[in-house]
Image (tube, rainbow, N blue to C red):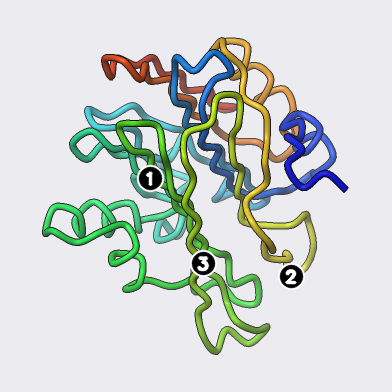
Amino acid sequence: MNVYEIGSIAEKLQNNTYPGRGIILGITPDGVNKVAAYFIMGRSLNSRNRIFKPEDDGISTEAFDPSKLEDPSLIIYHPVREIEDDLVVTNGDQTDTIVNSIKLGGSFEAGLRTREFEPDGPNWTPRISGIQFKDGSYKLSILKSVDAEGSGCTRQFFEYPPVAGLGHFIHTYVTNGDPIPTFVGEPERVDILNDIDEYTALLWNSLDPDNKISLYVRYTQLDDGSFEDIVVNANQ
């Protein structure tokens, strides 16, 4: 077994009808760009009634058809936000918790220690989060229930150096189910491509067509911080 093998992100997505929400952070093979990607999927009408909307400091989710919006508490949030030279990516409103923690002199970890998994039993959807630093290094985290009853929160943190051609992928669920099984283990080692258009198309076309909702991909040049980003919405 090669524990350092870099897996195909396309295969991982194509072989999983419902990874839920997912974060990918990494570095392009040519070492030029740091890469951040975030996607959302959904099974309910309320979850599927969403789009990613560009904001000055990242993106937000909003209802595609406001008249059909039901409970906004776990589906409307700011998944990607800049904080100085860093980029925060999460699957919920803990984005703001992390950004506020850093602004007050705290840290990624300190902010997340005040939060826990989503209160949507029996699924107890994990909160997944990432932060990407100026030099391309990054951290990932998952907050998940310690048991099927939601009686406590397990908080896991992972820290990575920038390695050309290597990305790490964390997602909320192992696969589809009822209840939906929570992600287990370390973030998965996955490939990154040099071209943002090619990588965006690869990710979007690999997600299950019945469940995918939106995708955000951002390539930031390590030498000067300039970036290009792409938003793809199933509803647009």
Q: Is residue 144 above or below residue 95?
A: below
Which residue is the site of mark 1? Answer: 131
- Asked whether the beta carbons under mark 2 and mark 1 sit within 8 Å of each other, the answer is no
Give the residue type at disc 1. Answer: Ile
x, y percentage for residue 226? 29, 14
- Asked whether the beta carbons under mark 3 and mark 2 sit within 8 Å of each other, the answer is no
- Pick whichever, 193 or 144, lies toward us: 193
Q: Which mark is residue 156?
A: 3
Dot 2 or dot 1: first in sequence order is: 1
For discs 3 and 2, the disc positioned in front in the rendered view? 3
Q: Which mark is residue 203?
A: none
Label 3 sits on a secondary structure element that is strand
Point 19% across, 54% down: residue: 102
| CA distance separating discs 3 and 1 | 14 Å
x, y percentage for residue 42? 63, 47
Dot 3 or dot 1: first in sequence order is: 1
Label 1 sits on a secondary structure element that is strand
Which residue is the site of mark 2? Answer: 179
Give the residue type at disc 2. Answer: Pro
| CA distance separating discs 3 and 2 | 22 Å
Classify residue 134 by image quadrant: top left
Point 59% across, 72% down: residue: 124
Classify mark 3: residues with Cα within 10 Å, few (<14), some (14-19) or many (20+).
Answer: some
Q: In this view, does 38 lie above or below 18?
A: above
Point 68% across, 35% down: residue: 190
x, y percentage for residue 58? 31, 32
x, y percentage for residue 95? 33, 52
- Pick whichever, 46 or 194, lies toward us: 194
Give the residue type at disc 3. Answer: Gln
Point 54% across, 42% down: residue: 23
- Residue furthest left in the image: 104
